[in-house]
Image (cartoon, rainbow, N blue to C red):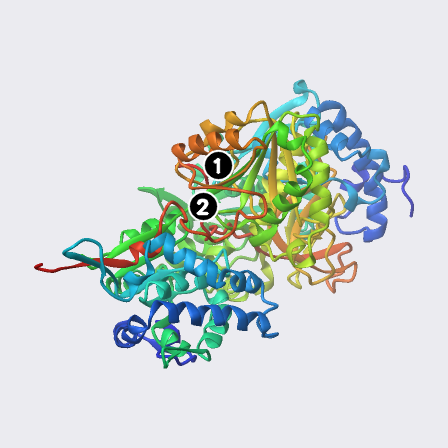
Amino acid sequence: MTAGPAYDLNDLLLNPPYSIPNDEKNQLLLPIVRTQLTGAIKNNHHLANLFSKLDLSPDDIRRLEDVPAIPVQMFKYFDLKTCSEDRIEKVLRSSGTTTGVTSRVPLSKNTIINQIKALKSILKDHLGGRRRIFLVIDHEGINDPTLEFSARTAGVRGLSIYAKKIFYLMREENGELVLNLPIIEEVLSQYQDEEVYVFGFTYIVWSTFYKQIQEKNIRFTFKDVKVFHSGGWKKLKAEQVSKEYFSDEIAGVFGTERENILDFYGMAEQTGIIFVDCECGNKHVPNFAQVIIRDPYTLKPCSHNEVGMIEVLSVLSDSYYSQAILTEDLGYTIGIDDCPCGRKGVYFRFQSRIEKVEVRGCGDTFRE
Amino acid sequence: MITCHLLNGEFSKEEFDDFTPIVDVINQNRRALQEMPFDAVIDLLVKLGRKIIQNPEINTLQGVSYISLWLRRKNLEQIGKTNYGDCRYLDTFVPVDNHVALSAQPRGVVCQWVATNVPTLAFFSLAQAILSKNGSIAKVPEENSAFILALLKELSTISTSSNGVTYHGRDIVRAISLVSFEGRNPEISRMFSLIADCKVIYGGSEAIRSILALPQKDHCETIVFGPKYSFSVFDRAYIESERFEKALENSVKDIAVFNQMACSSPQVLFFEKSRYSLEEIGSKMKGYFEQLPPLLRHQDTDSAILANTINMRSRFLLSDHQNIIVPDDLGWTILMDTTTRLEDPIHGKCIFIKEIESVNNVFDLITRKIQAVTVCIGDEEKRCSFAREATYRGVDRIVVPGATHDYDQPWDGILPLSRLVRWVILKSES
């Protein structure tokens, strides 16, 4: 198939998310990206600076890998809005855990709708499209709209799309997370025969929920359960907890199989796209996005199994520069179109965040 | 657990729970070094310099050719003279007055915390302890230990004769131990600090502060080579002179050596307004970056530094009044703007170049953390006057392009050898 009017963004969102072979998808995404970039340059002088200094026009872009990638940190320093101010519905602010400076991601109504459609499409692939009981392994306060947007809140809000009822399994007590026992008892007594899905921040699932559940010897036995979790692997690896061990133990808590414990990778700056583990443990790229792994030194795309920086391209946004965002995460592709799970497109694995090393030399700063 | 890579002249790995057996050996062996004439010590080091450059297994290692040059007799004698005034103090009492004679005795065991950033650093640190006739226990980064062990192995095979007595390099080596241990282990760090008669510390702020907080012997001398920052400044006359191209070429080499990880590495280059625009100067530098030998052009760079470089490049591309000149890879980066300020180092050959109205504008940027300023001012009187003001404000070294990393004395405002000895006097009755 060649680029043309056969598909537009809506078509991409309506189709099953992993249905288009990679080459074909690249051809479909390219004209959409070009059009979006043209608008972006028109509406944002920073982006105009970027393209001008690179002596690049969107029309010159022949491959997705040639779209200039903006490092995710730039959302902390620049307004990367790509539409007029009056179209901005809300500004998503991610937590500034490392630098103290928060990212600003401006969202238009259209972008929000696209992101919701995208997330629905991805979750439908794993949940079958039926509304379920949603259990959150966190406290209800995390969803407070007055608080800063974090990976935890993004997960809870995003995944609640298929919730017919939400239960928070933890509560906050003197700044500590503890089991929300009355809620857990309610779930155990009334919803054991239901179809359920669960979300928690990986480290919280392990360090607080799992440990306390073990102490209380609590076990769930739902009719059908999928457990989504994300983030915090660095701390788990420091505790020498492997992904397999984690999945087996959490599967034991929920009375299910390892395959139903689904790690996913995502970022606030690309809301709407989460990369969920398939049955084979691979993360798949949906139709409306692309992932390129880049060599950190040459910035060229890596070969399969070669570890590099993860770049996420997306066509979901018309309100900020989502078209190519370079993360500070490391990962590697495994293959294209041929995962035994049957999903098309690039599939990859997350490895780690880039470690912020202390410069151990003597020339660290000029400040006294 | 303490891993000892060298003890009593034996180059083999051994594990220890504490430093007592190591310090006992060093204390016993340092006597032979103390009794060695200073000339013989220099002679052995000079021979080492000649030998390592002839050894094909060593001479290809980065830094060996510089060490070989540094070990020239003239240089070593000059270092001795600069630090001690008279090198005879190291061997005997020298009369300084009718009834007073002066001598320099080694402090004893020098414990050295050597930073990772410059692979040759451990050698220069040990050389200072040798030239002050001290025993050494050096905590050397694992990644650099093979390099320093190779040099010391060479030293252990050298001998020299003076007045019918033969002196052996192995006696110097026997007064040295190389150790590695987990720096964050408070108990081992505490033990290491407590055995020192003198502590020599290299590193960033965090490392320096934690080591200084350790308990130590009451008499222990502490020499700190802490975090420092370096930059360059060019005046208009110099930029428009014939010397400019060569200075730029050498500046690029200064940036490339040690991948900008040393305290002497320039991080910002300031150029007075001249007939060349900043873009033209950047283009000239680009040419010299491209001409770097492959070993300097493509150095191992930590992925966090690469990520910082990518971020900084993007900040300059997105902003209104900044620009960049870069190759296809992250081998080097030129970031251009006109704000007169120092920038946090990115490292990995990522240089900020800035246009300024006057070289005098940089004075307000100088703090006691500025180590080297490469000053390219054509008029010697003006250069000297600039240097007086800059050093008053805190700069330790005013240098020329291509020589910013030359390990000369004093360093960081310190004459280390004179502090590595105890100055002792002998008074007589008449």
The residue beneath circle 1 is A143
Q: Is residue B149 found left or right of A269 in the rendered image?
A: left
Residue tagged 2: A138
Q: Considering the numbered disc 2 on the image, is that residue within a helix, a strand or a loop?
A: loop
Q: Is residue B227 above or below residue B155?
A: above
Query: Local crowd at mark 1 within 10 Å, few (<14), some, or many (≥20)?
Result: some
Amino acid beneath label 1: Asn
Q: How many marks?
A: 2
The picture places residue A364, in percent across and down from the top left corner, at 46, 45
The reply to whether residue A285 is in sight is: no
| Chain ID, mark 2 | A
* Residue that lies at the very extreme toward the top in this rendered image: A86
- With respect to residue A143, does B31 lie above or below? below
Question: What residue is drawn where x is 62% and y is 32%?
Answer: B238
Q: Quadrant of the N terminus of chain B?
A: bottom left
Q: Looking at the picture, which amino acid does disc 2 mark?
A: Asp
Which comes sooner in the sequence, label 1 or label 2?
Answer: 2
Q: Nearer the viewer, residue A97 or A8?
A: A97
Q: Residue at the left extreme?
A: B429
Instruction: List x then y, in percent, for residue B407.
Output: 47, 53
- Please, which chain is the residue tagged with disc 1 on? A
Residue B394 position, x and y percent, is 40, 36
